[in-house]
Image (cartoon, helix red, strand yellow):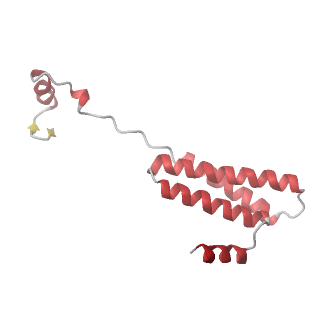
């Protein structure tokens, strides 16, 4: 086992710390447990199901469509939070929230894909 300039068996390294009045727990950290992949996959599945229902099922009332839209956007936000927790990426999380909102707005019928492209060109 090697730790910086200290090399030896685990007992020797532990004795080195104890003989010098050091606490090994001050120097070693347990690695953080990663977020399970299930927490990333589940919101994506919910998002795709909501997107499919909004896109392909035509005989829904406006209240049901709004409810499905909110569930789908909530799933997108949930996925963004999970990406932020697992990968520590604020840009990735923000991109996922923006993309899920725009995709759900197109599926809900508020925006047309052509309008979406115009909004993107105007912002740049």
Quarter of the image holding residue 49?
A: bottom right
**Which quarter of the image is occupied by the N terminus?**
top left
For the point 50% across and 50% down, which residue is it? 84
Q: How many marks?
A: 0
Q: Position of residue 98 (x, y in %)?
A: 61, 60
Q: Position of residue 110 (x, y in %)?
A: 78, 66
For the point 15% across and 39% down, which residue is it? 3
Instruction: Using residue 120 as the reference point, say whether residue 72 is left or right of it.
Output: right
For the point 61% across and 48% down, which residue is it? 78
Please tell me whether residue 46 is drawn above or below residue 112 in the rendered image: above
Q: Position of residue 71 (x, y in %)?
A: 73, 50
Instruction: Using residue 90 as the reference point, say whether residue 110 is left or right of it.
Output: right
For the point 30% across and 34% down, which residue is it? 29
Q: Position of residue 55 (x, y in %)?
A: 78, 65
**Which quarter of the image is occupied by the C terminus?**
bottom right
Please tell me whether residue 67 is drawn above or below residue 57 in the rendered image: above
Instruction: Using residue 4 as the reference point, say whether residue 47 is left or right of it.
Output: right
Quarter of the image holding residue 48?
A: bottom right
Viewer-side residue, 10 vs 116: 116
Viewer-side residue, 38 vs 111: 111
């Amino acid at each position: 086992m090697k730790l910086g300039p200290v090399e030896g068996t685990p007992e020797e390294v532990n004795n080195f710390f104890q003989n010098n009045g050091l606490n090994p727990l001050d120097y070693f950290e347990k690695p953080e447990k990663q977020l399970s992949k299930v927490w990333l996959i589940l919101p994506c599945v919910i998002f795709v199901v909501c997107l499919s229902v909004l896109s392909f099922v035509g005989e829904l009332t406006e209240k049901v469509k709004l409810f499905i839209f909110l569930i789908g956007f909530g799933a997108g936000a949930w996925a963004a939070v999970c990406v932020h927790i697992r990968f520590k990426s604020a840009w990735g999380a923000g991109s996922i929230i923006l993309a899920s909102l725009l995709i759900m707005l197109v599926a809900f019928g508020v925006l047309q894909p052509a309008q979406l492209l115009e909004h993107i060109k105007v912002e740049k």
